[in-house]
Image: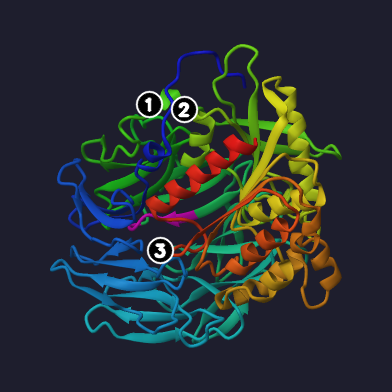
Amino acid sequence: MTNALSIRSKYTIDQFMSSETIGAVSVNDDNQTILYASDESGVFNAYTVQVDGTNRTQITESTNDGIYPVTYLPGSHDFIFQQDREGNEISHLYLYQSNGSITDLTPSENEKASFLQWNHDRNSFYYLSNKRDARFFDLYKMDITSWKAELVFKNEDGLNVVTVAPDGKQLAIQHTVTDNESNMYIYSNENGLFQLNDQPGEAEFIPMMFSQDSKELYFLTNETSEFLQLKKINLATRVVTLVAEENWNIEFARFSPQYSFLIYSYNEDGQDKLKILSQDSNEFQLPELPEGELIAIKLSHDEQAMAFVTNSSVTPTDLFGYVPTSNQVIRLTNAQHPEIQSEDLVKADIVHYQSFDGLTIPAVYYEPYLNKDEKAPALVLVHGGPGGQSTTDYNPMVQYLVNQGYAVMAVNNRGSSGYGKSFYKAADKQHGEIDLQDCIEAKKYLISTGRIDEEKIGIMGGSYGGYMVLAALAFQPDSFKVGVDIFGVSNWERTLKEIPAWWESGRQALYKKIGDPYHENDYIRRISPLFHADHIHKPLIVLQGANDPRVLKVESDEIVAEVKKNDVPVEYLVFEDEGHGFSKRTNQIKGYQAIKTFLDEHL
């Protein structure tokens, strides 16, 4: 899409990164107070605001490690939050009390814990913890009077407990076979573990939630479709009924606290959408939504107040309050930096292009505002995963680069999620090869616009996308002019052998997708850029978190050292207090400014 010439303001990285990021919402039983996470202070902390927009207050004062509130305690302004240490992903659950005291509820040193759900009476909650065995997550139940925990389900087979029935007698469990196949189980003390899906063939079965009477289980499956559909199964008769389907993946579903509404989200060609169905299965419409997509919604326990969040490609996530009795939506935050005007930014454009073999590849495209006959430098942006997806959500780094004159094309190469199961598995055991070709073919689309300088196209990505950057420079060394690698894998042999202990349940699925480092070593080394670094002769910048448990710092250390031997310009930034992703504003500003400076010099 060609943007018409007009005078547009340029903004600094400080302005872009000073826009607020909102998340982790809970609505208090008083129907007045909303709890949420915000990085307004520079790191994530807990904030509250009244549903009418008054009395916004910062509750916690962390200056280093992000605090992410999970839920209010029933009938109280105390709440539970989650926090790790400097990005190590070993998150604990904490109790914050209104007097300011904080208690670690899961204090074992290497325990990784996550909140699952409240029990029916809300006098205790369920959570997952790997304190017994670092590889597997057991299910615990913690009483909120004594704050004592009891083991409910001992996980010794790499299973994933997804939800507990309202009657507390049944668990819904998923077992991952591959990234394309999973099985679904019910567990009870009375009957033990039994599998619900018994049809042959490769398909996903993902439990979501039980019905209010605990007699039915709602789940997602692509057994009879390219896309995930929402179905339910009667646990007594095993009769399966279709509940909802879209021409895209339904990604999540849940009931409102009193089961008045069924809420589900789906992915429409890189755009997140959300539907709310009432008890009669009619779609419930909120009044006069602001521009952007409704991406999440939370209701108070009695459903008399709700909070929801919106997002668009040119506006950060914002929080809104809604009281059904007044039918009024009230904006609670204005996350965009006050000096940035959304009309100066570039809306995401969903485009499609043909790859080398005729397969259609979707992408999210941002073209800067250009003068007549002006041509822009461009970046092909590759998402993480490998099975991730680039979407139209607000991305301040992308908007900053586009605002500074760079076109960005976020490619959803084969192997990306969101486009059906065939597309998702199309790159299995061919990563860094066939999906890399999709990224290279993106250049043809960029050039075809007539607005891109074909001699100034680089490649950028984070995590698996960072690997793709290194793969492009090593295996197709003349395809891109520069590479921007953000904590990317350079040596699959090491990364696959040293995945975090808590990923054990998905280890074999990862091996079946990427390759087995113990039995397919020659292949693994063939697709690992570190062993082919002598071919890299284009400028490279690498960003890395020192505490990253997924892509270890040594991955970046070694590729930087090897590429420097080629007498190639290499820049390397390490953030000592970050993990897999940069959560602190000062680090984001430093890192993204360094990327822009590097691109200005080399692209």
Asked which secondary structure carries label 3, the reply is loop
Q: Is residue 515 visible?
A: yes
Residue at which label 2 appears? 345
Q: CA distance from mark 1 to mark 2?
A: 7 Å
Image coords of residue 46 (percent x, y): 27, 57
Residue at which label 1 appears? 341
Mark 3–mark 2 CB contact (< 8 Å): no
Examine the image and state in which quarter residue 357 appears.
top right
Q: Nearer the viewer, mark 3 or mark 2?
A: 2
Asked which secondary structure carries label 1, the reply is loop
**In this image, 159 relative to 479: left or right?**
left
Within 10 Å of disc 3 (Cα), the crowding (few <14, some 14-19, many 20+) is some
Label 1 amino acid? Gln
Question: Quick one: label 1 or label 3, which is nearer the N terminus?
Answer: 3
Magenta-highlighted residues: 253-258
Kindly identify which numbered label has been placed on residue 63.
Answer: none
Question: Quick one: label 3 or label 2, which is nearer the N terminus?
Answer: 3
Q: CA distance from mark 3 to mark 2?
A: 45 Å
Kindly identify which numbered label has been placed on residue 212.
Answer: 3
Label 2 amino acid? Leu
Q: CA distance from mark 1 to mark 3?
A: 46 Å
Mark 1–mark 2 CB contact (< 8 Å): yes
Taking the spot 53% from the left edge, 39% from the top edge, the residue there is: 596
Within 10 Å of disc 1 (Cα), the crowding (few <14, some 14-19, many 20+) is some
Taking the spot 74% from the left edge, 34% from the top edge, the residue there is: 443
Residue 256 included in the magenta stretch of the image:
yes
Image coords of residue 253 (percent x, y): 49, 54
Residue 575 included in the magenta stretch of the image:
no
**In this image, 419 relative to 525: left or right?**
left
Position of the C terminus, as image quadrant, is top right
Taking the spot 73% from the left edge, 39% from the top edge, the residue there is: 361
Within 10 Å of disc 2 (Cα), the crowding (few <14, some 14-19, many 20+) is many
